[in-house]
Amino acid sequence: MPLVKSTAIVLRSRKWGDADRIVTCYARSLGKIRGVARGARRQKSRFGAALEPFTVCRLDLFEKPGDSLFRISHVDVTTSFQSLREDLGLMDSAARMVNVVAAITPDGDPDPLLFDTLERGLSSLHQSKDPAYTALLFQIRLLGLTGFRPQTDHCVACGKVQLTGGPQFSPVAGGLVCLVCAARQRVRCVPLSLGSLAFLQQAVRLAPELVTRLRASGQVRSEIEAAIEGYVTVVAGKRLPPVDFLSSARSV
């Protein structure tokens, strides 16, 4: 079995067998991969906390021909992002970032720019005064990077440029639709105010490093959150936990 080395970000980890873990990572040179860490749940495991979600690490992997599951033999932590696991607000938003990456990226398709965007996104949460909003902007950037950029210039269903009535965002169609086409969508469209439309148009056109300069509050933010949440659900093929799912669970 050949040895493979790669820098990776841990997306999720789950129990496997009596003492092992199956770890899903996004590796800079390999894309999304899954690996088994033997004995990772034992008290004196050599892995320690190195395979916790959000951790940036250097992995030593063994690849077996014909098997999509790598064997993780060694881990060196580069950045632990421990603080993201100690604050509910930060953890919720970091979880949304890695969950979206896990849901909409294919296995084994490396994209160094996507890796860097996720690493910067997790790092930016430390300085963010509004982690949930930071996670929202990250999702918009990620949709663009993965080929799912929302269409905001014309009706994505019929091609009409001049849309009469209020703008409608169709999660299924992946962008704006006219009122006639909105009535034909199998999933309810999200009505957008002119302010929300202007925000979304800027967000999909700006360079990734400039998107964070955009500001949204009140009605605009609520509408953009609804539109992106619906679209991510369609792209991922399932509804992801809401950004504040941990906080909500605690308050019950």
Image (cartoon, rainbow, N blue to C red):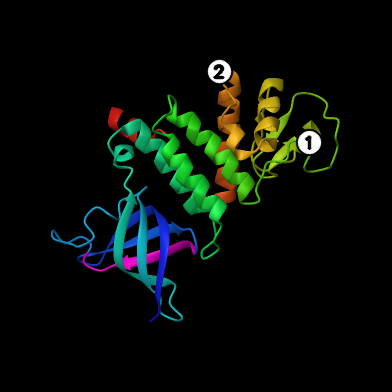
Coordinates of residue 98 in the picture (x, y in percent): 44, 47
> Can you give x and y, in whole percent of width and height, for residue 204 in the image?
67, 37
Sooner in the amino-acid sequence: mark 2 or mark 1: 1
Q: Quadrant of residue 127?
A: top left
| Three-letter residue code for mark 1 | Asp
Which secondary structure dominates the residues rendered in magenta?
Answer: strand
Secondary structure of residue under mark 2: helix
Q: Residues within 10 Å of mark 1 (few under 14, many from 20)?
A: some
Considering every residue shown, the one lying at the far top of the view is 218
Residue 218 disc label? 2
Q: Which residue is mark 1?
A: 153
Q: Which quarter of the image is occupied by the C terminus?
A: top left
Q: Please state the total of marks drawn on the protein image.
A: 2
Q: Secondary structure at mark 1?
A: loop
Q: Which residues are magenta?
A: 30-39
Mark 2: few, some, or many residues within 10 Å (few <14, many ≥20)? few
Along the line of sight, the residue nearer the viewer: 85 or 128? 128
Q: Is residue 212 above or below residue 100?
A: above
